[in-house]
Structures are given as structure tokens and as C-alpha cells.
Image (spheres, rainbow, N blue to C red):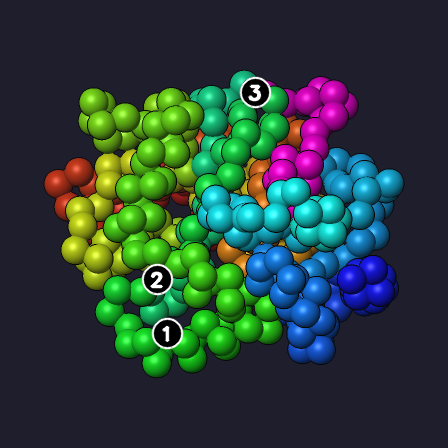
Amino acid sequence: MASALSAFRVSISRISPFRAKHFSYPATSALAHSYRVLCSSSHSVSSSLSDTSPSSFSLMETNENQRWRPMCLYYTHGKCTKMDDPAHLEVFNHDCTKELPVTAADLERLKPQEFDFFLVLDLEGKVEILEFPVLIVDAKTMQVVDLFHRFVRPTKMSEQAINKYIEGKYGEVGVDRVWHDTAIPFKQVVDEFESWLAEHGLWGKETDGTLNDAAFITCGNWDIKTKIPEQCVVANINLPQYFMEWINLKDVYLNFYGREARGMVSMMKQCGIRLMGSHHLGIDDTKNITRVVQRMLADGAVLKLTARRSKSNVRNVEFLFKNRIK
């Protein structure tokens, strides 16, 4: 086990944070295989791999004395059975807040926000939703409060189509097995998500179904405007009222910095933030978007709602910024 762990460290230390245009990790299928072998004695691979070097920017970056570790995706689903295994704990992270630290200096230009909390969301899945990750960010401290993460089992796709899709999307980064081990139907995801929101006092059935002093942040309109309503139809459930409005970070970024960024990677490049983890693994993208959110808050941005659905017809969306990404 020690030799495997050593080889694992050497392998990930060679990966560049900007290795290829898609910023996909691990660098090779062989590395993904070695990652699975390393975890086979506990449970399957739990996240993607990334660069271990600290960024030249101090804001929200990994401490120079700490090695970046992928998140245990069994842990995010409440199914990690290796919390007493030193080898497992050496390889995998079980606390998302450590990846997104904030210092006193970061708060110097922080401005009052319209919401107490932000819910950073980045879905994965084109045909149906495959991954549903959300991070709570405290608007007053910029600290990450908690993480909700679920893999989602499609409702209408055949098992053959699911297997092929998951192998293609998650196989390269070595999380296809953990997806199959943990994925649950979308309706169950929504139920568990609402319980999680209620635990944090951000939502309750006794209210009108909207969020309490919180707003979703997405990198684009697609996640909440398009995909969630589509998935609700497929899953035969009503669209939850808390998905009636949101903040498109692209629009706020454009108006605050006066420059256009078409996606998360562009924002990170322009801000000099090093990408961590695997692009298009939802949990990693959500954490990277959160790092952009933290940077913008630290620079003095006020994150306001950018889109709102019509109550009479949820298909109609009003975009609240005149200057926006189209």
C-alpha cells in the first residue's frame, strides 16, 4: 500500500493545472486505473485528480504546506466506511471547507450583500441530470458552510444507455464506479436537498417554498432556467418554488469587471485563479465557481439576482440585467 501511495503522489505531482484545453484530470487512463487500484481495498475512486502546486495568488488557494486531495465522493453521499483508515484519509479529503479558505485580508473590501447566503450550483448531464452539487457560502464571511452532493440516476434512460453514458463521462476521471454505487432518482435527490436546506434554516415547507435569505448562483442560465424544469417533467414532479430566481455569475462578472467571460475557465484565467480538480465533474466545478465567487466578493462585487421566472408561466423568464451575456 505504501508503494502504491508513493506512486500516486508522484503521478499527481506531474499533472499541470492547464494540461489541456479541456483541463481534464487525470492526465492518462493509466493514472485513472492506478487511482482505482489504490482505492480498491477501501471503496472505489472518490474524485478526480489535480495539480498539487499552489497558485501565485494567495486568495482562496491551498496552503503551500498542504497537498491538494480529491474529495471522497462516498463521504459526500454519507457512505464512506473508511474514516478510521489512515491510508484512505491520507489520499482523500473529507472537508470541503479546507479547499476554500478565507483570510482577514480577503474581507477588507467585502460589501454588504442582499442575501445572507449563496447556493453555488453546477449541474452535470445533458440528456438527464447526472450530478447535483451545491455549496453554501456565507455572504458575510465568504466562508463555505456546507456541501450537498448527489449523483443522479436517470429516470427514462435504459440501463444500457446509462452505462455507456457514465463510462464515457465519468470513466476517464475514475468516478464511474462511485456513480453506480451512489446514484439515486432525481425525486429522492430533491427530497434530500430540501431536508438539507431545512437543516440550515434556508427553506421550510411552512413558507411559500422560496429560500430564506439565500440565492442560487450558477455559471450561466442553463442549469436553473432550462435543465431543472426539464428534469422535473421527466421525474413527474412540480418545479420547486426556490428555483424561480437565480444569479447568473457571468452577468454579474461582466458588469462588475467590465469584461466578458463565457465560462468558468475563462473567469478563472482572467482572475489568475488556478483550476483545481476535473473540469466537468460537477463537484469540482462547483468548488471552482465558488472560488470565483469568493474572489469577486473580495474585490467588492455585490451579487444581485439576474433572472426571475414569471409566476403565471414558469417558462417565461425575465432577465434583470440590461448588459448581460446572451
How dense is the environment of label 3, judged by Cα within 10 Å: few (below 14), some, or many (20 and up)? some
* In-front residue for pair 303/214: 214
* Left or right side of 311 for 251: right
Q: Residue at x 61, y 48 (%)?
A: 82
Identify the secondary structure beneath mark 2.
strand
Across and down, in percent, residue 25 comes to: 67, 66
Amino acid type of the residue tagged 1 in the rendering: Ile
Q: Which residue is drawn at 46% across and 36% down?
A: 119
Residue underneath mark 1 = 162
Residue underneath mark 3 = 140
**Decide: marks 1, 3 in contact (CB < 8 A)?**
no
Across and down, in percent, residue 283 comes to: 54, 51
* In-front residue for pair 133/8: 8
Q: In which quarter of the image is residue 57?
A: top right
How far apart, in angstroms, are the residues tagged by discs 2 and 3?
36 Å
Residue 96 colored in magenta in the image: yes
Whichever of callouts 1 and 2 sits on the residue coming sooner in the sequence is 2
Amino acid type of the residue tagged 2 in the rendering: Arg
Region in magenta = 93-111
Whichever of callouts 2 and 3 sits on the residue coming sooner in the sequence is 3
Q: Which residue is drawn at 78% across and 62% down?
A: 1
Residue 313 colored in magenta in the image: no
133 up-or-down from 47: above or below:
above
Q: Can residue 262 be seen in this view?
A: no
Residue underneath mark 2 = 153
How far apart, in angstroms, are the residues tagged by discs 1 and 3?
41 Å
**Mark nearer the viewer, 1 or 3:** 1
